[in-house]
Image (cartoon, grey):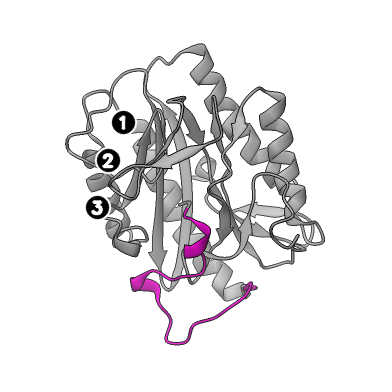
């Protein structure tokens, strides 16, 4: 889940520890094991949604399914109630960039570019991931947007290992996006994830001097989540105060994984291919 920087490090109500922690957390072996489980729940739900979604369903249908499955696996939805967000998933279609609110009035149609983002809170820790689904047949341009968004995520993940820096991730993402003619959304970032849904550090998808270039350490857990627009990088938020859309009505795509930093590389905790 992307969220504006002024909400970073504020915990969800269900995950608020008795004692607020600050700064970047390094997870212990035990904590990592729990995060593997929370992330597996998220990966399972997203894989199932990708297989069941079809034209005629509503985003409320997907939200109900996600909540049911998350709870069946012994977790609670990370997003529901988070700063007032009403859903268990963010469901953003076509020109909607992030934070789309699930609705029984929002019908999924063939050709849609559908972003589904969800999180699970399990035994004190969150997992967080997003996929973009091409609903049946999409245009060649939209198919490329989705493909480059996913490739960009993995270009960033490939830079993850102890001793590398956040800007190594950001640069790899930015370069791949721009080389393919798309724009990187700068209004939203990735983030640390663990006891809180949003923790430090902010994980940028473009080079910047606005934030410290944090050195990666073994045991850090990051939600890496590039967002690409087919047109302008600029977004605006609708009157519901959640849904962000492109200013030029161009389509948007996003992928996200929860990733563990290891001594020699990384582990993708929300890897759907292992489900």
Q: Which mark is residue 68?
A: 3
Q: Which residue is label 1 attached to? A: 53
User: What is the secondary structure assignment of the residue under circle 3?
Assistant: helix
Discs 3, 1 touching: Cβ within 8 Å:
no
Predominant SS along the magenta part: loop
User: What is the secondary structure assignment of the residue under circle 1?
Assistant: loop
In the image, what residue occupies the spot 65% across and 39% down? Answer: 154
Q: Earlier in the sequence, mark 1 or mark 2?
A: 1
Q: Quadrant of residue 261?
A: bottom right
Q: Position of residue 122 (x, y in %)?
A: 40, 67
- 20 in the magenta segment: yes
Q: Earlier in the sequence, mark 3 or mark 1?
A: 1
Residue furthest out toward the right: 163
- 257 in the magenta segment: no
Query: How far apart are the two marked residues, 2 and 3, measured between alpha carbons?
Result: 10 Å
Left-right relation of 217 to 229: right
Discs 1, 2 touching: Cβ within 8 Å:
yes
In the image, what residue occupies the spot 50% across and 68% down? Answer: 34
Q: Earlier in the sequence, mark 2 or mark 3?
A: 2
Query: How far apart are the two marked residues, 1 and 2, measured between alpha carbons?
Result: 8 Å
Q: Which residues are magenta?
A: 3-26
Q: Which mark is residue 62?
A: 2
Residue furthest out toward the bottom: 19
In the image, what residue occupies the spot 77% across and 57% down? Answer: 165
| 177 is higher (above) or lower (below) than 270 | above
Q: Residues within 10 Å of mark 2 (few under 14, many from 20)?
A: many
Q: Position of residue 221 (x, y in %)?
A: 61, 62
Q: Which mark is residue 203?
A: none
| 236 is higher (above) or lower (below) than 247 | below
């Amino acid at each position: 889940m992307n969220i504006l920087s002024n909400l970073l490090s504020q915990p969800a109500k269900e995950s608020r520890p008795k004692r607020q922690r600050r700064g970047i957390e390094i997870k212990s072996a035990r904590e990592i094991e729990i995060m593997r489980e929370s992330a597996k729940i998220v990966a399972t739900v997203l894989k199932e949604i990708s297989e069941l979604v079809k034209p005629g369903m509503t985003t409320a249908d997907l939200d109900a399914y996600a909540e049911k499955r998350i709870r069946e696996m012994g977790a609670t939805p990370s997003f529901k109630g988070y700063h007032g967000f009403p859903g268990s998933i963010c469901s953003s279609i076509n020109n909607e960039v992030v934070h789309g609110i699930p609705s029984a009035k929002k019908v999924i149609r063939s050709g849609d570019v559908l972003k589904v983002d969800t999180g699970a809170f399990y035994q004190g820790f969150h997992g967080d991931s997003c996929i973009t689904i091409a609903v049946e047949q999409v245009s060649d341009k939209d198919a490329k947007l989705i493909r480059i968004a996913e490739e960009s995520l993995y270009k960033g993940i490939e830079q993850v290992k102890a001793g590398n820096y956040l800007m190594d991730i950001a640069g790899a993402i930015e370069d791949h996006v721009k080389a393919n003619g798309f724009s990187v959304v700068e209004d939203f970032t990735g983030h640390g994830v663990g006891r809180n849904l949003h923790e430090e550090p902010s994980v940028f998808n473009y080079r910047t001097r606005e934030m410290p270039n944090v050195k990666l350490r073994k045991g850090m857990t990051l939600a890496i989540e590039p967002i690409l627009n087919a047109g302008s990088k600029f977004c605006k938020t609708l009157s519901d105060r959640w849904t962000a859309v492109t200013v030029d009505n161009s389509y948007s795509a996003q992928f996200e994984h929860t990733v563990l930093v290891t001594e020699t590389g990384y582990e993708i905790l929300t890897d759907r291919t292992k489900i």
